[in-house]
Image: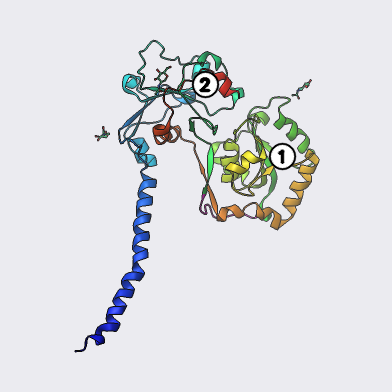
Amino acid sequence: EPIWKFLPLFLLAVILLLSSLPLLVYHSLVIQMLHVQQYPAPASQRNLSILLWHWPFGRSYSLSGNKCLEMYGIGHCFLTDDRSAYPTADVVVFHHQELSNAASILPMHLPRSTAQGWMWLSMEPPVNNANVKQLNGVFNWTMSYRRDADVTIPYGETLPGAGMQGFQSALKRSCFASWVVSKSKPNQTRVNVYQSLQKYIPIQVYGKWKKKPLPDDRLLPTISKCLFYLSFENSETKDYISEKLWRNAFQARTIPVVLGPSRPTYEEVAPPHSFIHVADFKSVVELAVYLNHVAADKQAYEEYFKWHKTHRIKTYTDWRERLCQICLKYPSLPTSKVYQDLDGWVNR
Ligand SMILES: *[C@@H]1O[C@H](CO)[C@@H](O)[C@H](O)[C@H]1NC(C)=O
Ligand SMILES: *[C@@H]1O[C@H](CO)[C@@H](O)[C@H](O)[C@H]1NC(C)=O
Ligand SMILES: *[C@@H]1O[C@H](CO)[C@@H](O)[C@H](O)[C@H]1NC(C)=O
């Protein structure tokens, strides 16, 4: 047989092999990436021990087993609330509230290893962090929603990739706007804005303030009936964007009307065209006019939900998930840092 008779077959084999190469390479890359993303172990493969000195607000959760790995895919990271682990803990975490009201005290009487780091933890804005001064010169690191904290744990974040389905159009909503508020202080900006805004648009108010509490399982269903949700923070302070945006508004699939940090801060963390900022309007009347316009214009309303096609929201609510984040950050935490002026940092 002349060799050229096999040429077509040979060429076909070569073409098949070559065309599948990129796919093979791509495949192995994807597998590598998935692996890295699922198990982002600390640079040192050493096990880290994170001791939570007391539970935030007195509510405890189970830490048995390997919670960081089981629940969040974070390896080599062990959480404990057993104070006998103190001598060998890599990080000791202190939640601020219990220190400030003396429900818990710092173990200043115990010897402190120079390799151990103490972490100050608070998810509250400065107004709710009383008595910080007494803690100056004690902590190595801070953990907060603030983006300049050593460990930043936001209430929520925007991730690429389409998320939730089932958008409910404006037509199906039976309520204009709602607001859930537990405490109202006179003179608070959010209260002032509400007081004037409710003259122009109907606002359903829930929560302790109006003695209309919403149980947890009623919260999102109730808010989701409304076109808008007032995501008004209790104070307008650096980076403070709470679950009032991430859970109450976004998870209920309503348009948040936000009052808090400046628009650029929201733009950096929230999905594109996903909120209406109070400060964009010269007056409350102009804000009300705009809300009425969006409510009446189907296209304008649905514009605010386009981001669902390209982005999704992740919320952080479990203290354990927050604590596990320490291990991811641990290799890059500064050494020999001490917050000599924690009070200044908190109130900056
Ligand atoms: C880390 O902890 C796991 C589970 O307790 C254990 O099996 C492993 O040997 C430890 N690794 C190191 C380096 O100590
Ligand atoms: C934390 O600060 C103390 C001093 O207050 C220091 O001795 C210790 O080395 C620091 N820890 C770390 C991990 O930097
Ligand atoms: C708060 O209210 C009081 C009187 O009601 C007023 O004198 C004061 O200027 C107000 N403060 C702010 C920050 O609006």
Q: Secondary structure at mark 1?
A: helix
Q: In the figure, 305 relative to 10: above or below?
A: above
Residue 198 visible here:
no
Q: Residue at x 65, y 27 (%)?
A: 183
Q: Position of residue 297 (x, y in %)?
A: 73, 55
Q: In the figure, 202 relative to 14: above or below?
A: above
Q: In the figure, 18 relative to 41: above or below?
A: below
131 left or right, relative to 175: left
Instruction: Inspect the magenta stretch and tell me whether residue 167 lies in it.
Output: yes
By what rule are the colours in the image chosen?
rainbow
Tell me which segment is drawn in magenta.
160-169
Q: Secondary structure at mark 2?
A: helix
Residue at the extreme top: 109
Give amino acid for label 1: Val
- Is tag 2's residue or tag 1's residue first in the polypeptide sequence? 2
Residue 325 visible here:
yes
- The answer to the question of whether label 2 and label 1 lie on touching residues, with beta carbons closer than 8 A, is no
Q: CA distance from mark 2 to mark 1?
A: 30 Å
- Say which quadrant the C terminus sits in: top right
Q: In the figure, 106 relative to 5: above or below?
A: above
Instruction: Identify the image quadrant of residue 77.
Output: top left
Q: Residue at x 35, y 39 (%)?
A: 41
Q: Position of residue 182 (x, y in %)?
A: 63, 29
The residue where tag 2 is placed is: 97
